[in-house]
Image: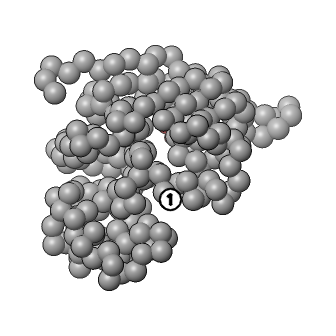
Amino acid sequence: MIDLQHVNKSYGQGATAFHVLKDINLHIDQGEFVAIMGPSGSGKSTLINIIGFLDTAFEGKYFFQDENVADFNATKASRMRNRHVGFVFQNFSLIHNLNIFENVLIPLSYGGHRRSEVRGKISELLESVGLTGMENKLPRNLSGGQQQRVAIARALANSPQFLIADEPTGALDSHTSADIMQLFKELHRKGGTIIMVTHDEHVAEQSDRMIKILDGQIISDTEVAHATK
Ligand SMILES: Nc1ncnc2c1ncn2[C@@H]1O[C@H](COP(=O)(O)OP(=O)(O)OP(=O)(O)O)[C@@H](O)[C@H]1O
């Protein structure tokens, strides 16, 4: 599904150019649960920005279901993002003056759905993340873990082909972090494709495949052994 071939990315030009991603070759299939690890500044965000169609200014090829992402213009990239990718961030990125229903509605309204049409869909999404009946609450009245669950429901709203989660447990205590990882594992069991960036080895070990990046290069790409699945 995701196929990066000899991808290079530099910021700036000429003598001041900074080569961030170096000859990245990466294939991710539908249904995989991948963790990307690496120290600060190693290029993880740059890589997931390319994978999630946020950045199309790179060298090399990125085939997403046989289309070369390098050929996308801004309109096409944003359409692909909205249709195919769900984003989950460390700080949840909820809109604070909108209630939970309205936060989950945002990606659906880009897709042209009206509020009345999606009421049932939003209840189902909230149920799937364990937040049944929370529609009318404001984000500030929820715990960090619950806010991340709302963000995950919002990311799933358009039934994306894959989720990109950038340090999804980075702002959570270890107990809540474990709960959120259980939710990701459940989504993965149901067939979801998840690409997660994390600094935390314990979090990465919950995935099925660990990719380590150092100085813009993939230095290892290994299957994670699970005692029980
Ligand atoms: N827009 C930009 N312009 C110039 N340099 C940038 C830009 N974005 C990132 N960089 C540089 O590219 C390198 C890789 O950054 P990136 O954010 O991809 O790393 P990261 O592994 O995600 O780090 P972190 O874990 O701290 O988020 C860093 O040295 C960073 O300073």
Amino acid identity at mark 1: Asn
| Residue 31 or residue 35, whichever sits in front | 31
Q: Residue at x 44, y 66 (%)?
A: 107
Classify residue 53 as left or right of residue 91: right
* Colour mapping used in the image: one colour
Residue 109 in percent (x, y) is at 44, 74
Q: Residue furthest bottom?
A: 116
Q: Residue at x 62, y 41 (%)?
A: 67
Give the position of the C terminus as an image quadrant. Answer: top left
For label 1, the crowd category at 10 Å Cα-Cα, with few meaning under 14, some 14 to 19 and many 20 or more, is many
**Residue 213 vertical placement versus 199 (above, below):** above
- Does residue 44 appear in this view? no
Residue 225 in percent (x, y) is at 25, 18
Classify residue 38 as left or right of residue 41: left
Tell me the quarter of the picture where residue 178 sits: top left
Q: Residue at x 24, y 43 (%)?
A: 190
| Residue 138 or residue 187, whichever sits in front | 187
Of helix, strand and loop, which one carries label 1?
Answer: helix
**Which residue is labeled 1 in the image?**
82
Residue 92 in percent (x, y) is at 37, 58
Does any atom of ligand 1 lie closer than 8 Å to the CB of label 1? Answer: no
Residue 194 in percent (x, y) is at 37, 40
**Residue 203 vertical placement versus 164 (above, below):** above
- Does residue 5 appear in this view? yes
Tell me the quarter of the picture where residue 228 sits: top left
Q: Quadrant of ligand 1?
A: top right
